[in-house]
Amino acid sequence: MDVGELTGQFAVDGVLRFERTASGLIFARVTAPAAQATVYLHGAHLTDWQPAGEAPVLFLSARTELAPDKPIRGGVPVIFPWFGPRHDGLAGPSHGFARRSEWELAFAALAGDEVHLTFTLGPDQTSRALGYDHFRLAYRMAIGRALTLELTVANEPGAQGPPLQFEEALHTYFAVGDVRETTVTGLAGAEYIDKRDQMRRKLQPQGAMSLTGTTDRVYLDTAATCAIDDVAGKRRIVVEKTGSRSTVVWNPWAEVAATLPDMEVDAWPGMLCVETANVDDSAVTLKPGETHTMRAVISVEGIR
């Protein structure tokens, strides 16, 4: 659909409108009573969420390229069907194809003071070339004072061949005042893969987690709620989840940020990724006709 068609079918006066960037990307602008947000059809990518009376909750790189062939750096990239490099030895883009694909908006409505959106993605020429021809994705958002993100993956009934195996993540970039003064709770005692230390498996010590350098960890077999205590920002960001057995924590620090062309070298203190995921040991397998849903509910609380 183009902007005119989306406007005619889904726009809500004063609440939901559609625009196009100079590079051709279409996005939805939400200005609901409870929150404002921006969502691109490219990747079904939420780049901004700001509850009423709060500072923006998501980090978006000022240097990201809003281009049809590029992933967006920041917000909430949707990772599917693999996390990081493809694992089976075949070619494919980092973090899969979903975050680079053009999704369809299937539903939009104002419900109370929230805006509800549903995006869908099915097989296309790109996914088929990568060997994925029997999946369907539905991505539901409820945008209000809390943010609900729900990703459902289906293996089509009657699909031929092996079961659908995949990894998935909501690669959420949170905006923080200073990551060096930020802690994460909810992961104490969990086993994690340290991607910065030759993929060694380690145990997270008791107490809150603090970051002191480049961090890239996959926490395994954890369904726990995580809380980000942003001391400099004077707030707590709470991430509740269901259907997820992995949590990824990432910050590039100065060392890796200097190698990222789509991120300012001094922007890393203002962001922290805490990702709702099913990766590595928690990869999902679906037989034909089966579905799986992963859900994250994000809220903001004040702290002293």
Image: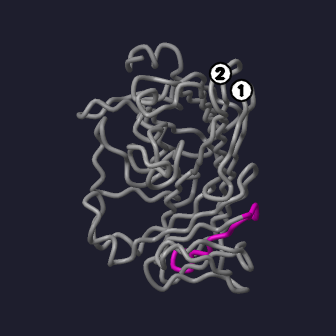
Residue 247's disc is none
* Residue 80 at x, y percent in the picture: 53, 43
Judged from the image, the secondary structure of the residue bearing numbered disc 1 is loop
On the rendered structure, is 302 left or right of 15? right
The disc label shown at residue 288, or none: 1
| Kind of residue at badge 2 | Ala
Foreground pick, 196 / 43? 196
- Residue 302 lies, with reference to residue 114, above or below; the image says below
Q: Is residue 217 left or right of residue 286?
A: left
Residue 196's x, y, as percent?
46, 76
Residue plotted at (50% across, 24% down): 123
Q: In this view, does 168 lie to the left or right of 74?
A: right
Which residue is identified by label 2? 159
Residue at the image position 59 percent from the left and 71 percent from the top: 193
- Separation of disc 1 and disc 2 at Cα? 6 Å
Where's the N terminus, which quadrant? top left
Magenta residues span 221-233
Q: What element carries label 2?
A: loop
Identify the residue at horizontal 46%, vertical 50% (top origin).
86
Q: Where is residue 284 in the image (x, y as percent from the top left)?
A: 68, 46
Looking at the rendered image, the quarter that the C terminus falls into is bottom right
Mark 1 Cα shell of 10 Å, populated few (<14), some (14-19), many (≥20): some
Comes first in the chain, label 1 or label 2: 2
